[in-house]
Amino acid sequence: MVRPVEPEPYEREPELITHHAHNGTEDPYGYDPYDDRYDDRHESTALGAEGEDQYDDEPAEDEEDGKKKVLTPKQRKRRRWRIIRRVLYAMFGLFVVVPAIAFVITYFLVDVPSQESIASQQSQPITLMYADGSPMGKIAPASGGSRYLLKPGEVPDAVKKAVYAAEDSSFETNSGFDVGGILRAVYNNVTGGQGGGSTISQQYIKKATANEAPTLTRKWTELAKSFKMNNQMSKEEIITAYLNTIYFGRGANGIEAASQAYFKKPAKELGASEAALLAGLIQGPSKSENEAYAQKRWNFVMDQMVANKWLPQADRAAAQFPKPIPKAQAKADDAGTLSLHIRNRVIDELEARGYDQARLHQGGFKITTTIDPKAQKMAEESVAEGMKGQTDESILNALVAVDPKTGGVVAYWGGPDWVKNDQGQDVQAHDWANVPHNPGSAFKAFDLAAFLKMGKGLGETFDGSNNRKFDAGGGNYRTIRNAGESSNCGTQCTVAEAMKVSANTVFYDMVINKTKVDPVAKAAKEAGVRTEDEGGKSVLYPDLNIALGGGRTVTTAEDMAAGFATFAGEGVRQKQHFVAKLTNSQDEVEFDETAPKGAPAFSDDADKSKQIAGNITDALEEVVPYSKLKCPKGNECAGKTGTQQYDFKDSDPASYRDRNAQTWMVGYTPSISTAVWVGGDGNKPLHDKSGKPIYGRTIAGPIWEDFMSRYLTGKPTEKFDNVKPIGKDARAVPTTTVSKPPPPTTSTPETPTTTPTPTIPTEPTEPTETGGWPTKPTKPTKPTRPGPGTSDPLFPNGQDPG
């Protein structure tokens, strides 16, 4: 058939817009196969549901089966709303119906663990091993009365209310979960934050499962179990089980053990203030000894108790922060012969990484430490040998050795584990290796690091004269003297020579006029001295006393060993640590720190950092032989002594005027860095077995020498790499000739008088030990540094840098 020919468009008669409904595309009686009015049955007016005039509907084209269909805007809008409704139905099913079904299924599948089963899980021993895998000892779980499980009704009301205030104020009314908390947890997980909002019931479940993962899966299971728990147990039973389970720090699982560990009393005798302290520690048990944190949490809990009308305002106003007993008096339940000081350092390190004792006991973890059993034995023997015959009961000591290549602490001695108190009772002793003291002249190594970072060299010269007067700012002047009234290294003293003779005036001048204070503190931190903000205990106080390691600047033996280890490690800092590897009871590795993970310390440029460290080593190499100390046979070594003077009092005997309170020897080879501290608890006028003042080279020095010799015997010999001098080379500067230092048996200060005589750069003639043992010759590529070495930041007329 031949299709009829349609007239051209210009021949067609225009249609009226009002006749469009009868043009064959829409039934004149109103039937529209695409009409969606069955979804909108209330439309009966001439206007559409949205108020449009039906005569304003413009035809629009749609395509179906290759043919064009016409839909009005109103029809398009209806189609869009239909799609939206269907999406909403799907979302409701997906996010409401499906989760509800899943929750019901989960509810019937999970079981609520009993407090007895949790207590048994928390009772697995923690195993510690030496670096070579040999057994070190075990930390047994709390036992006996300290693990007594309270029964419902035995928990004091003050304790319950304090815990509600700290952790879950809606506990008495919620169903085991907090919807707001769950939404916060979802939001935090989606945005990369930390989950939160757990109720007491959920926390109990988390402890039961030992699952700390901040995941939605864990939250979901907790929710189901806690809801089931609230259906099966009374609120009194739940809070009792929770308090019998939760960890409070100090190795105490459960409120009864915590009450004994902190206050030496049963839980039934706890008052509101004491309960608030313990409740506040639940969120941060590893911070139990941080008084600032404990007070902050205590104030929060007390205020919340008032806000919830659980504590009268008058009682809150009268409340005093309770002082717990010292941690040293809370004797640990340990098995074996494990050193308590090492144990505590290991536990502290793991707690900082999120593995508190409760988690370690529950997982039956195995800890491989960095401690070398042979080195540890040598350290203890060297300290015992060095202290033999000493009569001053105020003398204390510590030794820490660090591997420069890994940062692992290979030997650690902080003193005996237990001592007698005034009542004759055994109490845990202070760990003197982890107590900060004035480092004295040993800190000058960090002055030099800051100086070298400026591009200045060992050949720079300063006035090293004695009794120099400095403008300390604010109209204050301070007279600094070297060790000994007439000791000096001349008016043109090189930095290399000043380090060797430990000229206080040079380093004070260097810091006040060249480096300034803050760069010195920064250099010390870069090397490895850890301040409180880095989890350490050292204090780098921002005043000029830092130049001589005095005043309020204090460091620990561990930090000094780690700081000098960075010099030994060619400018690469390895963070000091005690835990080499952690595995759970299934031998699954949690983390492994055996591989070096260091980074350049003093510059982003590894070569620059190495050059700085090498120049420091160049300077410190000459200190050791002059201080009449020997390097381990066949090895090169470097180090620095340090002495802090006793702060003389008018009421003291005249003989105390030259006494010292803290002494150090810190030194290293490429293989090991060791710090030895011999001093007193604070400002004590110490004396040796001959009744003479002690110095860095008289007791600490020989202990260091003995340990280093023992440790490196039988090991391959090592030497330091040569590096280019930074800035002015000391070999190009005329040096001074000085006299031999006095023997350690005299009471003369360590720095003898010097006679500054200009000479051409030649290799110096070093003093020899009694018996003719020669000192290590200076390497030709290193600067010549004649002059005696000392370490005494002494101030005239009692002007100690404090």
Image (cartoon, rainbow, N blue to C red):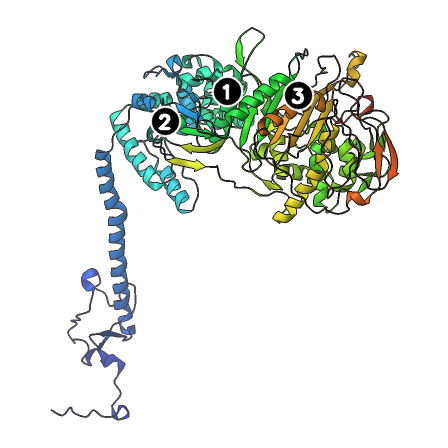
Residue lying at 70% horizontally and 28% vertically, measured from the top left = 641
* In the foreground, 166 or 492: 492
Quarter-of-image position of residue 544 = top right
The disc at residue 339 is: 1
Q: Considering the numbered disc 3 on the image, is that residue within a helix, a strand or a loop?
A: strand
Q: Does label 1 or label 3 sit earlier along the sequence? A: 1
Residue type at mark 2? Answer: Gln
Q: Which residue is mark 3?
A: 678
- The residues tagged by marks 1 and 2 sit, at their Cα atoms, a distance apart of 22 Å
Quadrant into which the N terminus falls: bottom left
Quarter-of-image position of residue 180 = top left
Relative image position of residue 725 (x, y in whole percent)? 72, 46
* In the foreground, 661 or 543: 661
Q: Residue 233, relative to residue 223: is it above or below?
A: above
* In the foreground, 712 or 468: 712
Instruction: Give left or right: position of 63 versus 270.
Output: left
Q: Which residue is mark 2?
A: 362
10 Å crowding of disc 2: few (<14), some (14-19), many (20+): many
Relative image position of residue 605 (x, y in whole percent)? 62, 49
Residue type at mark 1? Answer: Ser
Residue type at mark 3? Answer: Val
